[in-house]
Image: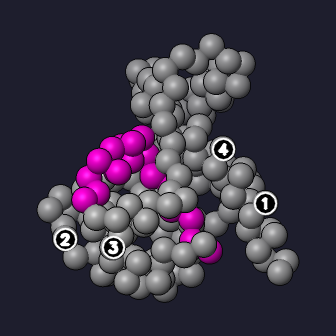
Amino acid sequence: MLLAAFSTSADQLSVSLYLLQQYLPGTTDFTVYLDTILASGSKIILFFGFPSNAKLIMRQAKAKGMVRPDYIWVGTHTMYNYLDNLATESDRRLANGMMFSTLREDHPTSQYQTLRSQYLAQYPSQPKSLMSGFALTYYDCLLALTNGIRPFLLTAHNH
């Protein structure tokens, strides 16, 4: 549901979502996933995984030329612990410029109340418990990222 809501907002802002991939726990070779991203031409990668996986993925992405200034990697709040998992300086350098979203527990703002009302109106059969902080944070953060990334894409496209 949140992906559908985010997809709708992305479409309204002229941001294209190329693909969604999932890997199984314990995966250590991410070649097929990274090759699919490369083939898509996408330069903005949203990573919803754990720091231990990110370390492997970033190493493999670097080997494929996917850790450069023209790529944007965005993770979730779990990336707070990313640097704790890095034993080598080369791994720490892979984290330069990485962005991640985090949860804000209080939601008294008018923006949140508007979002909540719109979400519940669009999905009336869903339980209101889905509106908890963790469930909604990704929609809210990704919507903000979409709004922020769009000018970057427009600028890059015009050059």
Q: What residue type is labelled 2?
A: Thr
Within the image, what quadrant is residue 143 found in? top right
Q: Earlier in the sequence, mark 1 or mark 4?
A: 4
Label 2 to label 3: alpha-carbon separation = 11 Å
Nearer to us of marks 4 and 2 is 2
Q: Earlier in the sequence, mark 2 or mark 3?
A: 2
Q: Determine the secondary structure under disc 3.
A: helix
* Magenta-tinted stretch: 70-87
Label 1 to label 2: alpha-carbon separation = 35 Å
Within the image, what quadrant is residue 27 found in? bottom left
Label 3 to label 1: alpha-carbon separation = 29 Å
Q: Determine the secondary structure under disc 1.
A: helix
Q: Where is residue 153 in the image (x, y as percent from the top left)?
A: 73, 68
The residue where tag 4 is placed is 144
Residue at horizontal 34 percent and vertical 65 percent from the top: 89
Q: Position of residue 98 (x, y in %)?
A: 50, 57
Q: Earlier in the sequence, mark 1 or mark 2?
A: 2
Answer few, some or many: residues within 10 Å of disc 2's Cα (few below 14, many 20 plus, some between 14 and 19): few
The residue where tag 2 is placed is 28
Residue at horizontal 64 percent and vertical 66 percent from the top: 16
The residue where tag 3 is placed is 59
Which residue reaches farthest right? 158
Q: Determine the secondary structure under disc 2.
A: loop
Q: Is residue 103 left or right of residue 82?
A: right
- The answer, for residue 80, to whether it is visible in the render is yes
Q: Determine the secondary structure under disc 4.
A: helix
Residue at horizontal 56 percent and vertical 65 percent from the top: 72
The residue where tag 1 is placed is 151
